[in-house]
Image (tube, rainbow, N blue to C red):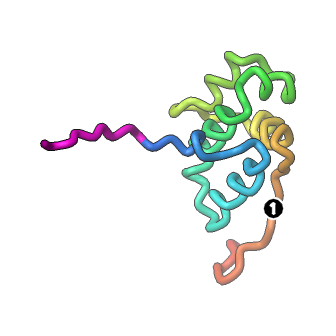
């Protein structure tokens, strides 16, 4: 008798706890490639809950859903507000090994 198994899409939110969010977001951007950050922020928002993120940021849920959507393009102040809700802040640091523009 053959057993059938069903696969389900992987969702990082199923394995992430609210206490892990700051480390998760920091790790996503550690290599300097920020392309994964929007999806990671959405995952973090799903773990925390959009209502709770709205409460912490003062942004309404519609704005958060739009900002953290696949095609979202948050303003810098909005990004900083969302990161602050997760206990993080934007920081600038020198890039090593690259030539600076004159």
- Name the residue nearer the viewer: 6 or 24: 6
Magenta region, main secondary structure: loop
Q: Is residue 33 left or right of residue 64?
A: left
Residue 62 position (above or below residue 10): above
Q: Residue at x 73, y 48 (%)?
A: 21
70 in relation to 83, above or below: above
Image position of 12 (left or right of 7):
right
Note whether 88 is above or below 73 in the view shown. Answer: below
| Residue drawn at point x = 15 percent, y = 43 percent | 2
Q: Position of residue 59 (x, y in %)?
A: 80, 22
Q: Position of residue 66 (x, y in %)?
A: 62, 23
- Where residue 62 sits, quadrant-wise, is top right
Residue 25 belongs to the span the image colors magenta: no
Residue at 85 percent across and 50 percent down: it is 89
Depth check, front residue: 92 or 100? 92
10 Å crowding of disc 1: few (<14), some (14-19), many (20+):
few
- Residue at numbered disc 1: 92
* Residue 78 percent coordinates (x, y): 77, 33
> Is residue 5 highlighted in magenta?
yes
Q: Quadrant of the N terminus?
A: top left
Task: Specify start and end residues of the magenta stretch as a single range.
Answer: 1-9
Q: Secondary structure at mark 1?
A: loop
């Amino acid at each position: 008798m053959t057993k059938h198994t069903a696969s389900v899409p992987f969702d990082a939110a199923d394995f992430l706890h609210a206490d892990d969010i700051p480390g998760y977001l920091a790790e996503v951007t550690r290599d300097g490639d920020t392309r994964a950050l929007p999806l990671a922020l959405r995952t973090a928002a799903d773990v925390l809950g959009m209502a709770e993120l709205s409460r912490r940021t003062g942004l309404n849920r519609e704005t958060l859903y739009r900002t953290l959507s696949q095609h979202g393009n948050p303003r810098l102040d909005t990004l900083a507000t969302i990161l602050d809700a997760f206990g993080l802040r934007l920081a600038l640091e020198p890039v090593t090994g690259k030539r600076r523009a004159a």
